[in-house]
Amino acid sequence: MGLKKIELSVGELALRAGIATSAVRYYEEQGLIFSRRTAGNQRRYHRAMLRRVAFIKASQTAGIPLAVIAEVLGELGDSESPSTAMWEAASKRWIDDLDHRIALLEKMRDMIGSCVGCGCLSLSACHLLNPGDELHRQGSGPRRLLAE
């Protein structure tokens, strides 16, 4: 039985992870994965980056933004791969965010027939855009941008 390959090229990592080579480079630019350079200035990725890319893809599928994924991966070393315990800890951090998104999607599903059906989507009348907040009571306008 042959030895497992420890390092992968950009193309090999992309192929094995099921992503484009441009995504591999982008993830590296964002500090989500890491490589070393060969004497010929070619990138080489440790096999652990396969698990990191799988973690990134699973997180993105759950709707987690890359910036938040980067925060979690930032807690790892440069070549470490996410463990089951790390995934569980990350998922606990994201539960509130996911619950909020689910509630918003359910509300949208329940209101979409009347909201989109009427065609208004007005800031003053649309309960989906302004769910009973102070701005809703004040009427339409760009005040939401000034609220901070």
Image (cartoon, helix red, strand yellow):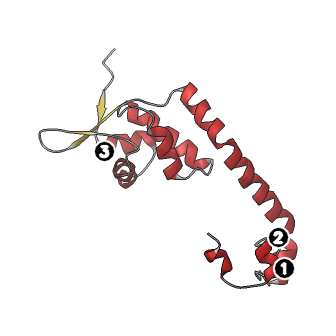
Dots 2, 3 in contact, CB < 8 A: no
Residue behind mark 2:
112
Residue 26 in the image: state x and y as whole percent: 37, 53
Disc number for residue 10 = 3
SS at badge 2: helix
SS at badge 1: helix
Instruction: Check disc 3: other Cα within 10 Å, few if <14, some if 14-19, many if 20+.
Output: some
Disc number for residue 144 = none
| Figure label count | 3
Residue 107: quadrant of the picture: bottom right
Question: Which is more N-terminal, label 1 or label 3?
Answer: 3
Residue 8: quadrant of the picture: top left
Kind of residue indicated by mark 2: Ile
Instruction: Check disc 1: other Cα within 10 Å, few if <14, some if 14-19, many if 20+.
Output: few
State whether residue 105 is above or below residue 75. below
Residue 135 in the image: state x and y as whole percent: 76, 76
Kind of residue indicated by mark 1: Gly
59 sits left or right of 53 in the view: right
Q: CA distance from mark 2 to mark 3?
A: 44 Å
User: If the image is split into quadrants, where does the C terminus sit?
Assistant: bottom right
Q: CA distance from mark 3 to mark 1?
A: 48 Å
Residue behind mark 1:
117
SS at badge 3: helix
Instruction: Check disc 2: other Cα within 10 Å, few if <14, some if 14-19, many if 20+.
Output: some
Q: CA distance from mark 2 to mark 1?
A: 7 Å
